[in-house]
């Protein structure tokens, strides 16, 4: 209904301006037709009437009746109308001394036409134009001029009075909305308020630090703010929305950019409900968290670095603990195993020095042999320690060649004290790939261990098992206690010296392995596995 009212009002406005334009043309023609009479004195003996003032006034009315336009054309039309209206007012002022009533009415009408669009401050609900009292005064004088024809006196010629009345009526019709502009003024105020609100909303949207995208109910993009374009790199119009979290949800999100990359954001999607609660649109908000992600990654990297540092410290602590254990074990071994031969050598040497002359020859020989035995034992222990240090630092390398096992075992038996009770059962053609010197030390230490901690008979055998050779040293003693087995091949085993530790490392350096088994019915079996040499 409101739309039809506005259409009807617009039609009435066009008709009023058309009538006003016709009135302007009529007044101009009337002024032209009566200009020749203004040159002579009227029949009543009055001064000549200024009918020519109707010409600029009529032209001013005609221009004011032209529909309003914006831009340069509108400003030129308004300026020409104002100039013509002021010209009519000036001409009427010039004629005041000769024809006061006609001149005053013309001055008022000219001023009214010149200021047709000037509004007075609002008084009540209806705005008032400055031309309203001027037109009222001009119309009153014109009506008095026409009414004076009914009595004896004549205020102004009838043609001038009629032209002035027509001029005032046309001025009123030129702006039909002015007298009753309450609705129009209210609409204009409403439109201005809405425009201000829209401008404020746009300003607020564009000034937000968060990236904001506004979508309709069908997820079509309505608008985005400046921060959104900066964050995504879109300079043109954004038509399709990027992948966004569902309404009512949010969290860390990867927002695609125009160049194909992605930026981490904290995204939220909020619905805009209507009066019934149904979503009429959506607002997507994204906050750039790239710096936060970089800080988190840097913190994670720092934590990983700390973990690696802690692991390195733990490894270093383990090495220090192993070194400390090695030092303690070495100190313990030196205290018990090394101190005994040294003490024996010192005591026997002191006895020989003190009682050399009194001791029989056989006793002196026996004591000298004991000193030699303990010296050899001490030298062997020092050699084992030297080999131990080399094994501990990984400085031992094996030069593996085919080595006949029977030959190595016989040589080791001949160099080992008490080995006359050792039985050998090895094929002469059986060979292993190993370092000859390493294998000799291994066999010698296994024999010494069996002699020292086992019982006769002691058997040494070997056999081929596919691509490997199994060497076995077995005694007939009580076997090795269960509590000793976990550390049997350790660095320092109390009472066993370094023999089995050296055996394990030398066998492993040659690509083999060593293990322990209980013998049946009793005894201990130490088994060495090495790679077999080609036949």
Image (spheres, rainbow, N blue to C red):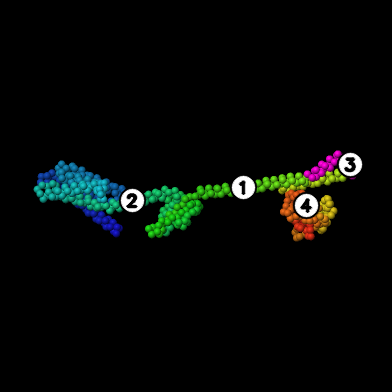
Which mark sits nearer the N-terminus, 3 or 2? 2
Disc with the residue nearer the chain's start (1 vs 2): 2
The Cα–Cα distance between marks 1 and 3, rounded to whole angstroms, is: 67 Å
Q: Is residue 381 magenta?
A: no
Asked whether the beta carbons under mark 3 and mark 4 sit within 8 Å of each other, the answer is no
Mark 3 vs mark 4, foreground winner is 3
CA gap between label 1 and label 4 equals: 40 Å
Task: Choose the circle earlier in sequence order: 3 or 4.
Answer: 3
Q: To which residue does mark 4 refer?
A: 442
In reply to whether residue 361 is colored magenta, the answer given is yes
Q: Residues within 10 Å of mark 3 (few under 14, many from 20)?
A: few
Query: To which quarter of the image does residue 357 belong?
Result: top right
Q: Left of 386 or right of it: where is 180?
A: left
Q: Which residue is mark 3?
A: 359
Query: Mark number for residue 193?
Result: 2
Does the rendering let one see residue 400? no
Q: Quadrant of the C terminus?
A: bottom right
CA–CA distance in space, label 1 to label 2: 68 Å
For disc 1, the marked residue is 310
Quadrant of the drawing holding the N terminus: bottom left
């Amino acid at each position: 209904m409101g739309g039809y009212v506005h259409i009807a009002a617009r039609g009435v406005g066009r008709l009023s301006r058309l009538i006003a334009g016709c009135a302007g043309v009529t007044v101009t023609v009337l002024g032209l037709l009566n200009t020749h009479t203004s040159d002579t004195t009227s029949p009543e003996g009055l001064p000549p009437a200024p009918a020519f003032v109707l010409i600029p006034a009529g032209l001013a009315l005609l221009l004011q009746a032209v529909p309003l336009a914006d831009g340069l054309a509108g400003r030129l039309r308004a300026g020409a109308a104002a100039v013509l209206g002021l010209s009519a007012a000036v001409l009427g002022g010039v004629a005041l001394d000769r024809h006061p009533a006609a001149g005053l009415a013309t001055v008022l009408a000219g001023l009214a036409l010149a200021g047709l669009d000037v509004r007075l401050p609002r008084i009540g609900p209806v705005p008032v134009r400055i031309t309203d009292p001027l037109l009222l005064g001009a119309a009153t004088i014109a009506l008095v001029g026409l009414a004076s024809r009914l009595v004896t006196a004549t205020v102004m010629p009838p043609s001038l009075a009629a032209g002035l009345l027509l001029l005032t009526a046309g001025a009123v019709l030129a702006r039909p909305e002015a007298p009753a502009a309450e609705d129009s003024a209210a609409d204009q105020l409403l439109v201005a308020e809405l425009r201000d609100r829209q401008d404020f909303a746009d300003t607020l949207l564009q000034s937000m630090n968060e990236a904001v995208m506004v979508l309709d109910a069908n997820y079509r993009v309505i608008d985005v703010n400046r921060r959104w374009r900066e964050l995504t790199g879109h300079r043109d119009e954004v038509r399709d929305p990027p992948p966004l979290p569902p309404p009512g949800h949010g969290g860390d999100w990867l927002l695609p950019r125009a160049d194909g990359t992605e930026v981490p954001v904290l995204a939220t999607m909020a619905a805009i409900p209507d009066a019934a609660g149904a979503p009429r649109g959506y607002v997507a908000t994204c906050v750039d968290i790239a710096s936060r992600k970089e800080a988190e990654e840097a913190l994670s990297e720092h934590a990983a670095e700390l973990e690696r540092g802690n692991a390195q410290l733990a490894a270093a602590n383990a090495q220090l603990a192993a070194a400390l254990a090695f030092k303690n074990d070495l100190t313990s071994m030196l205290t018990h195993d090394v101190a005994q031969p040294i003490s024996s050598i010192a005591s026997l040497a002191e006895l020989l020095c003190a009682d050399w002359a009194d001791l029989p020859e056989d006793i002196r020989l026996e004591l000298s042999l004991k000193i030699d035995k303990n010296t050899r034992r001490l030298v062997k222990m020092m050699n084992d320690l030297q080999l131990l240090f080399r094994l501990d630092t990984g400085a031992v390398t094996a030069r593996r060649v085919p080595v006949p096992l029977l030959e190595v075992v016989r040589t080791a038996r001949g160099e080992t004290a008490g080995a006359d009770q050792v039985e050998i059962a090895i094929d002469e053609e059986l060979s292993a790939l190993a370092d000859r010197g390493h294998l000799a030390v291994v066999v010698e230490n296994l024999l010494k261990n069996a002699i020292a901690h086992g019982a006769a008979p002691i058997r040494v055998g070997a056999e081929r098992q596919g691509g490997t050779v199994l060497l076995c040293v077995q005694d007939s003693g009580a076997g090795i206690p269960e509590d000793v087995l976990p550390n049997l091949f350790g660095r320092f085993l109390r009472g066993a010296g370094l023999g089995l530790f050296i055996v394990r490392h030398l066998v492993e350096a040659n690509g083999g392995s060593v293990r322990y088994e209980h013998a049946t019915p009793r005894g201990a079996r130490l088994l060495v596995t090495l790679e077999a040499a080609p036949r």
